Amino acid sequence: MTRRKLTVRFIKSFIKRLWLFVCDQYLILFFVLTIGAKLYYLNTFLLKMTWPANQYINGIIFGFLSLAVIFSPLYFARKNKNWYVIIVASIISALLLVDTIYYSYFEALPTVGLISSFNQVDDVGPAIVGLLRWWFVFYVADILLAIIFKKRIEHFFKKQKDKFANVKLGFRTSCLAFVITIVAFLLGFLPLGFDKLTELVESGHDTISSSQYYGVIMAHAIDLTRFIKESSVSISPDQEKTVIDWAKKHRPTNTEGPLTGLAKGKNVIMVQVESLGSFVIGQTIDGKEITPNLNSLSKTSRYFPNQRFVMGAGHTSDIDFVANSSYFPLTDSATFVRFGRDDFTGLPKIMADNGYSAFAYHGFNRNFWNRDTALKSLGYQKFYAADNYPKGEKINLGLNDGDFLSSTVDYIKEQPKPSLSYVITLTSHVPFDTSEKTENSVVDAKDYPYLVGGYLENINYVDRALGEFFAKLKTDKLYDDSLIIVYGDHTPVLPAFTAGTIKYDPDSVQEKEVPLFIKLPNEKAGQSYPSQGTHLDIMPTVLDLLGIKTTQLMFGKSLFVENSKQYQTCPDQFSVFTGLGDCETALAAEKNIAQQVIRYNLFNKLQK
Ligand code: GP9
Ligand code: MN
């Protein structure tokens, strides 16, 4: 027989076997396609955020791959096979329907951790009916079709198989299909590498972010893995006692300083500005100021031009945590995500104990960085997220700061007084896109390299939005008499550049410095405090200005209480407890205590 004839015979036999395989596994293949389409819809339209497109594609591919893996054990089933397949398909579709309904209310995917706190969603029950949409029938249409036409389809494929009665596909074919499925699934990890998966499990990301990388099903698997890992950690009674004794020994002494109690009983507005680095403050381009409003704030407030931000693995959410709790964040995982249900101690809780209302405001997804849960754990009674704000133009990640800050003043006005308002801005976030709103006469993004121009244009826009925010606060009589704190969360990641009077070098200290402005009630003249403090000091400083005493463990100190014997100043402007050895040893000891308190949720025990 010629080689050509052999090849033709081989191809024919391969196609015959492939068709016979389809005749065996048609229902599984059908559901991988139809449920895969549901996952595609979820990843691409419903849960979409502004991540780079390649993350969507990865998530979509993993949608199909993870389905194939779930169904793959059923390749081997013989008796009642189609009923098993329909049951599995129904369970997955029901889960996706729950995800969709949950998302339309909470803008997040449900997590395993929620099962233990069903009581928190009591009030949602009646709202569920209002969340149902007619198009949800598509979630079950494929299953209904499979049940209605089950007999007829089975008959059709049986006849097809009978045509090739001489060829039998047995256990070995199922094994081969199983192995191919698993290998394809593993190959799916190659583009992002296994490191990304480990990072998602270990460091913690909200479920939506995980779904953008690995699809919704894997996002649930990652969440489950993390939950099991967390539930299995524990601390010995001896270790626990050591931490508690340490904390007792280092309780704040509440030493008074020159400004102690100066803002007693006043409203507090804390504005955390996305990616605001110190290097833009006071700078000009062609003689025009880039941040005119913050520049004038620097002259009428206590201005710390070189604050150091303290960040772990949770990026901005760590800044939320550090500024509000005066605790070091975890370095191996996002504290908010992995331990967002802890009984954190912090500024909002203490202020609430002193008669304040404590509300947080941010124009983005409620559950990004698990904020909805974690801010509550810190003591914020209400969190206004994107779902509370009127829809407006989206710039970069979320609602533009102009609309966001304008509505925020209206909400702050309504907040019961005295009030603590924690405001997190967003526009100046990577990729620093520009829009008609950000256009201005100072910076034209096109004149500078990618990211640099966008950043400068964004930060000028944010400064303008802050100027309008201050003006509206003044109109509403909320400015002069309040304690207003403004600070950058962290610096932006940018290459070295020169623009106007800015000479930015990311390898220099500029990369570590963010500005902090503390405007005291009714203060008109300012004062500058160069090279002092970190974000750990924000909470103790606010408490000092309000004259509120606490015994709560804090790793920072009031920026206005100098020469306290309780602290020594260390490199990178950390104030570290005295008596713990040299700076390096002392810092390591403090971080170790902080991470044990967070990991084993010892906050309440330290209070006793
Ligand atoms: C999103 C904002 C930015 O809510 O806080 O987060 P980041 O990406 O900087 O961590
Ligand atoms: Mn940030």
Image: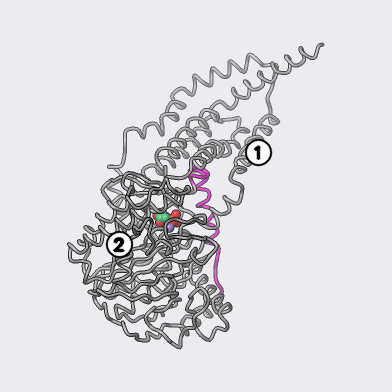
- The x and y percentages for residue 534 are 44, 72
> Dot 2, how many residues are within 10 Å of its Cα: few (below 14), some (14-19), or many (20+)?
many
Q: Helix or strand or loop: what does disc 2 sit on? A: helix
Q: Along the line of sight, which residue is nearer the eye, 89 or 275?
A: 275
Q: Is 25 left, or right, of 328 in this rendering?
A: right
Picture layout, residue 348 above or below residue 82: below
Q: Along the line of sight, which residue is nearer the eye, 312 or 345?
A: 312
> Dot 1, how many residues are within 10 Å of its Cα: few (below 14), some (14-19), or many (20+)?
few
Picture layout, residue 162 above or below residue 266: above
Q: Quadrant of the N terminus?
A: top right
Q: Which residue is mark 1?
A: 183
| Colouring mode (rainbow / by chain / secondary structure / one colour) | one colour
Q: Picture quarter containing residue 115?
A: bottom left
Q: What residue range appears in magenta?
A: 211-237
Tag on residue 364?
Answer: none
In this view, the residue farthest toward the bottom is 565
Residue found at x 58% / y 53%: 198
Tell me the amino acid under the disc marked 1: Val
- The x and y percentages for residue 125 are 30, 49
Q: Which residue is mark 2?
A: 293
Q: Quadrant of ligand 1?
A: bottom left
Q: Helix or strand or loop: what does disc 1 sit on? A: helix
**Residue 369 visible at all:** no
Picture layout, residue 243 above or below residue 315: below
Q: Is 577 left, or right, of 17 in this rendering?
A: left
Sequence order check: which comes first, mark 1 or mark 2? 1
Asked if residue 57 lies in the magenta stretch, the reply is no
Q: Picture quarter containing residue 171?
A: top right
**Residue 142 visible at all:** yes
Tell me the amino acid under the disc marked 2: Asn
